[in-house]
Amino acid sequence: MNKPLRRIAIFCGLLIMALMIRDNWLQYVRADELNAHKYNRRVQIERFAHERGNIITADGQPMTASKETSGSDYKFKRTWNNGTLWSPVTGYNSQAFDSSQLENIEDKILSGNDDRLFFDRTLSMFTGEKKQGGNVVTTLNSAAQKAAFEGLGDKKGAVAAIDPRTGAILALASTPSYDPSVFAGNTKADSDARQKLLQDKDKPMLNRALRETYPPGSTFKVVTASAALENGLYSSIDEPTRSPLPYTLPQSTTPLKNEGSIPCENANLKVALQWSCNTVFGKISDDLGNEKMIKEANKFGFNDEVFTPVRADASVYPKDNRPQNAMAGIGQASNRATPLQMAMVAAAVANDGKLMKPYMVDQLQAPNLDVLSKTQPEKMSQPLSAANAQKVQALMENVVAEGTGKKGAIDGVVVGGKTGTAQHGLNNSEKPYAWFISYAKTAEGSPVAVAVVVEDGDANRDDITGGGLAAPIAKAVMKAVLKK
């Protein structure tokens, strides 16, 4: 072969080698990146080419469905069975705007693309059966969810309910809510509907149960009482607390006030929680100090994100100076909590001091309903010894029997609770938040703990109380779980 031909052959060989390297680079090294690229329509078309699996309640009720469409590259789109009820649990799934929450986290199972469904996909190629997505079976109790949603009604607010024995989330409601079906497609109408929701000043797409933190108000006094017992500040709930009246905030000339004329001077923990004495719990927080209060709050889950598997914002018990720490001990200052976090507080107390990790996915199923995975309950922490938890139970049960939480009582059932009315705005200039946390007991332990927060902008300021607005909602949720 002469020299020019040899050079041409070498050059062509290099071109072929470069092409092969490039082809392999695209097919193997960059495959995942290109598959997930936002401009790769083939991936999106395939994603909506078949029916998506469903998200299902613990009692077998499907929250979702799929609907065949026409006039689009996308054959199917997502629908919901009462979307406003379930969107705080499922999130959305849209042909144009991707997905959120369980629809996003469990997308591979729901779309049928999970590696564990490889056999099902392969089999369908030979049998000619349509590809289907798998199912996500949740821990949600449909009766409890309905009671929470209807209890909130047209008020802004949220409800979180947990089974203290396992950590299973039984209800997760947020109002005002939205129907994900209105922007599940990819038309201009879908885009306009989503934009309208995003611009709504009431933020219907905000999951208040997981992603909004509020000052917990007097419901946090359950944590402060727990800290007092766990740190040996008091050994008995009947022991006088040596709390003066008036009580002046440390390093300050500002008196800490109680609501109304209530017996708070030198009150024991039982009386102090019954009447929600700010002076007693502010002094306890100061006596323990900021470091010990943070340590106890952290055991209940504060200062860390919680994954259910949907992420919940971190609740915050802050590092702070003495006056602010005293205020944080009564659930004010920079103390902030999600409704899920306060349900965790009630759940830990009800479960004899053991806090179970919250979760809302019970199992993942193949299209033929074979179980691919099942969640096992997992201990998260031990905020209280069993003995001290039982003392706090006595405190909370007295609040419902004799104190501010009477509207949470259920005939024939032992209920523990704590009300809270949290200040809101600069110098408490805005209407406060109404809180109630509670649990119900049976012979087999406590099957339900609930936290309710209500932002009621329409109520008269003097009518906004945790006992008045929030406790009846918690009662309805507990009754739904107990089937009362």
Image (spheres, rainbow, N blue to C red):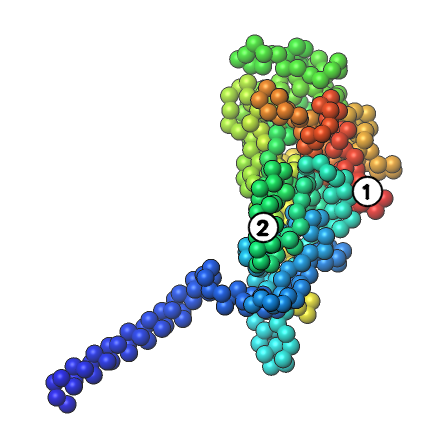
| Front one among 478 and 146 | 146
Place of residue 134 in the rendered image (x, y in percent of width and height, measured from the top left) = 64, 65
Question: Relative to 107, is 59 on the left or the right?
Answer: right
Q: Residues within 10 Å of mark 2 (few under 14, many from 20)?
A: few
Placement of 308 over or under 285, stated as above or below: below
Which percent across, then down, holds residue 89?
65, 49
Picture coordinates of residue 17, whole percent (x, y): 28, 76
Amino acid bearing label 1: Lys
Which comes before the other along the chain, label 1 or label 2?
A: 2
**Residue at left offset 68%, top offset 41%:** 175
Q: Residue furthest bottom?
A: 1
* Quadrant in the picture for the C terminus: top right
Q: Which residue is drawn at the image coordinates 56% and 30% (left, top)? A: 317
Q: Residue furthest left?
A: 3
Do the numbered discs 1 and 2 sit on residues whose CB atoms are within 8 Å?
A: no
Q: Identify which residue is drawn at 57% across, 24% down.
A: 333
Q: Quadrant of the N terminus?
A: bottom left
Above/below status of 340 relative to 61: above
Q: Nearer the viewer, residue 263 or 444?
A: 263
Please count the marks in the image: 2
Residue at the spot of label 2: 192
Which residue is nearer to you in this view: 273 or 257?
Answer: 257
Q: Distance between the residues labelled 1 and 2?
A: 40 Å
Q: Can residue 424 be seen in this view?
A: yes
Q: Nearer the viewer, residue 386 or 85?
A: 85
Q: Residues within 10 Å of mark 1 (few under 14, many from 20)?
A: some
* Mark 2 residue element: helix
Q: Say which of marks 1 and 2 sits in front.
A: 2
Q: Residue sitting at 66 percent across and 47 percent down?
A: 178
Q: Is residue 229 visible?
A: no
Q: Is residue 98 above or below residue 389?
A: below
Q: Residue 479 carries which label?
A: 1
